[in-house]
Image (tube, grey):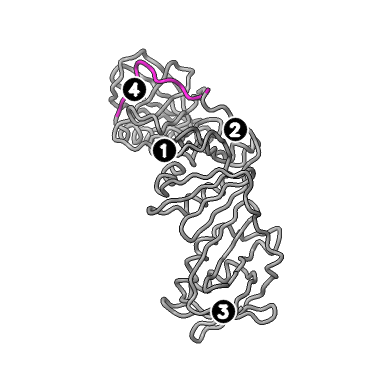
Amino acid sequence: MKLSASREELLKPLQAVIGVVERKQTMPILANVLLVAQGNQLTVTATDLEVELVAKADLEHLDVPGEITVPGRKLFDICKALPNQSEVRLSLEGNRLTVQSGRSKFVLSTLPASDFPVVEELEGCQSIRVAQTDLHHLLEKTHFCMAQQDVRYYLNGLLIETDGAVLRGVATDGHRLGLCEIDLDGQDPGKQQVIVPRKGVLELQRLLGDQGDVEIVIGANHIRAQMDDIRFTSKLIDGRFPDYGRVVPAITAHPIMGNRDMIRQALQRAAILSNEKYRGVRLEFLPGQVKIEANNPDQETAQDEVEVDYDGAVMEIGFNVNYLMDALAAVDSEQVEMNLSDPNSSCLIRAPGVDSTKYVVMPMRL
């Protein structure tokens, strides 16, 4: 293999795939990226056996085509450290890859390309096309509700569901839930549910841009997303996602309407003196206002009040303050609507009248 390209052309695909290259590896080959040079194009592939990323770059000159794997982070750091607009030459001799640019020269160890694990072609596929901004919006509005290292492994990911002409994302950690829907503009791929693991969700979110479409292919065991020169593939979590429809409360006759930022700032202030472990705050809903109270084991207390539009029964209820603040931060409107039917029920949070994005926060005993 012998080729040359500008630093920027080499850096672009490496930057796209480097996120899945773990620093600590169980298998040495997983610390490497696969380089395949053919037809004036360089294809860079990285994987951690759960997520695979493939990115392409155009080459200035390809003298000898070939393929090899090299330490991913080292090659990335070398290209990053080289001067802007410099020409980079890669040449493979035996089991060493030489990287040259100007007076700089680096010799990297390699492992055979045949040892690199690649994902097979997807089977049993269903294909849909959406704008990258729409898919990014769906992931951004739900990903923070995913569980982290929960024994219920199916919660450590995001449910992607096609339901008629709607693509839905749902995430829950058992204490809160985020749901977001986007329209498929007349595409109707039928009904299917898959669970994408946490790392795959975060990596895909990072890759999505603000222009162009993304083609999503859902297979039996994998999900694939193709954007311009980058291809993302992730294994799916094999498990049954909870029936989220049963935990989403109905809209109540007396919703609480208030200024999103004012409620969030009052919660932030009260949170300072909440119990550091449980993060509980007590909310008392009264006609026209909500009282917020927090205390901790040191007998310290915080109290705040916010004016709201509410004409229902007086209610007192406890919540994890972080979950409330996360949900409020994700609502895209100046006003927020909170729905509570009784002191033991979950709270449904959304922008007033908007049903495509909503959050559910379970109450806690204080």
Q: Would residue 122 be found to the left or right of residue 314 on screen? A: right
The Cα atoms of the two marked residues, 2 and 4, are separated by 30 Å
Percent of width and height locating residue 80: 48, 71
Which stretch appears magenta?
Answer: 246-258
> What amino acid is at disc 1?
Gly
**Whether residue 42 is situated above or below residue 308 in the rendered picture:** below
> What amino acid is at disc 3?
Leu
Who comes first in sequence, dot 4 or dot 1?
1
The residue where tag 3 is placed is: 90
Residue 299, visible in the rendered structure: no
Numbered label attached to residue 256: 4
| Mark toward the viewer: 2 or 4 | 2
The residue where tag 1 is placed is: 186
The Cα atoms of the two marked residues, 2 and 3, are separated by 47 Å
- Residue shown at the point (50%, 82%) measured from the top left: 101
Percent of width and height locating residue 231: 53, 56
The Cα atoms of the two marked residues, 4 and 3, are separated by 63 Å
- Residue shown at the point (59%, 49%) measured from the top left: 234
The Cα atoms of the two marked residues, 4 and 1, are separated by 35 Å
- Label 3 near label 1: C-beta < 8 Å? no
Q: Residues within 10 Å of mark 4 (few under 14, many from 20)?
A: many
- Label 3 near label 2: C-beta < 8 Å? no
